[in-house]
Image: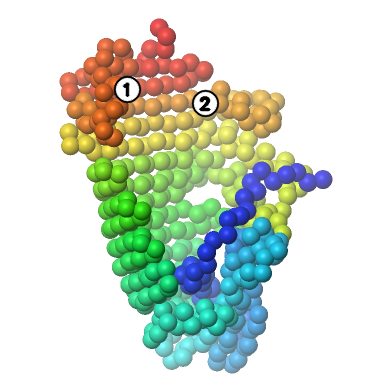
Amino acid sequence: MTQPNPIRQRQLSAKRRRSPLVPIALTALIAAGAAAGATAVFSSRAQDTTQKFVEQLGAGVNALGVATLKQTSYQKGFSDSTQTMLLDLGPQSGSQSGAGSSEKPVRVLITNHIKHGPFPALQGVGQAIIDTEFKFEDPQMQAQFEKAFPNEKPRIHTLVGLGGNTTSDIQIPSGSLTESSGSMNWKALAGTVKVAGQQVNADMNWSGLTYNADGDTGQLSGVRMVSTSRMTGPNEKLSVGNAKITIDKMELMSSGQQVNMSGLNIVSDTKLTTPDTYQALVEYNVGSLQAAGQDLKNLQLHLGFRNLARAPLERLVTLFSDLQAKKPADGTQAMPDLTAEQQKQLETDLTALLKGNPKLTLDRLSLTQPSGDVVIKGEVSAPQLASASAEQLQMLTAMPQMLMGMLNLHLEGQANQKALEELLALGGGKVAQQANIQGMVDAGYLTKQGNDVSMKLDIKDGQMLLNGQALGQ
């Protein structure tokens, strides 16, 4: 008997308007991965290496539910080889959007041209050089692709070093597309992906794009992504590292509403704080945001997932990854049901993860007003679970709503009084009219020291405290 899968993904039911832009972009990303992974040593080793890679890449792509990938041929030669793959994007057989529909998926032919070492194509010293190209099966789609890139085509060039390290250069030239509803113009994208053993370094730069569609306009500029990651072990799924995405400016105009944003940066950091404890941090920072008549400055949201027990987390990630890989490629099922053994292992690992006293932390939520910052911090944890009995934990897995009564919550806020009044005045001042800062201080909801006001809220052992005092006292 199998148990219903608690992490089954919801199927996409809404049928979207198809445009060549999305398949072109997604194809370029998957093709880049194919190029980076198709590391051929010499003719006798290249085929085994690339076929194994395609099996791994195909399992991941097929698990997305929006695409399937498979190798169709491998022609081995003495000095060079050619590997071809088929990538299908769009409705899959048996899916809600594809069942009973005559709409066919977008089919793309990906070709890796592999030059064997030790002096591949006389372009350097290494095990192999791979040049990747892709072509749409649909003549109209291919014609639009050719129109978007009439001269220079997107290029992925990979050098496999003698030690097995790879360096992939990704180049997507500037271009444009015009349809009956509007147009899009984009600037060149350039990037490098380096793989050395368990570590992957990526650096992408994109000047941006502009578009005009059905009267809506938009502009995106100054996009960069830099990341470094490595696996925590040779046979593990968890990775540690950091990444940063920055966008200099984004402007949108839709239905007469203007949204302008500048100085966006997203930073993530994952690491092992101890050999047995994992931590993941993410920061969202916006320099300025102008929307709905408001001009907001220096928005910051910093979150943390701390004290995550490494071993059960690794097993949970592995289970999820295996389920994704085993998902039928024809789309008839979102993900296989859990077996009784997998269900038991899932409950065991979730229990172990909770007993490690994980914490969700709000490291910073802030907004800058003319008179200063308004800052909120906090955390949520459940330390009682560390000493809970097996029977209590078993009840918790059967009735997860019990967890709410075991949570500890701490929130604290601080601001210059005038800055808080300025924040409350946003939106026409209706909130400010109802909120009397001094009255809140007198009532004990806020504490005041000099020109600053603050608040602390704690929920512990089922009791709620505001600024150290039990509510209602």
Q: Is residue 360 above or below residue 192?
A: above
Residue under the image location 41 percent in, 59 percent down: 228
Q: Would you identify the image quadrant in which residue 86 lies?
A: bottom right
User: Residue 112, located in which quarter of the rendered image?
Assistant: bottom right
| Badge nearest the viewer, 2 or 1 | 1
Work out whether 97 lies above or below 160. Answer: above
Q: Nearer the viewer, residue 364 or 91?
A: 91
- In the displayed structure, would residue 425 be above or below residue 42? above
In the image, taking residue 308 as reference, residue 423 lies left or right, namely: left
Secondary structure, mark 1, is strand
**Type of residue at label 2?**
Leu
Residue 365 in which image quadrant: top left
Quadrant position of the N terminus in the picture:
top right
Color style of the picture: rainbow
- The C terminus sits in image quarter: top left
Crowding at mark 1 (Cα within 10 Å: few <14, some 14-19, many 20+): some
**Residue occupying the point 55% across, 26% down:** 404
Q: Residues within 10 Å of mark 2 (few under 14, many from 20)?
A: some
Residue 193 lies, with reference to residue 364, above or below; the image says: below
- Between discs 2 and 1, the one toward the N terminus: 2
Query: In terms of depth relative to the viewer, which is nearer, 287 or 467?
Result: 287
| Marks 2 and 1, how far apart at CA | 20 Å
Give the percent coordinates (x, y) of residue 382. Answer: 53, 28
**What residue is shown at x 67% (from left), y 55% (from top)?**
334
Which residue is identified by label 1? 455
Residue indicated by mark 2: 407
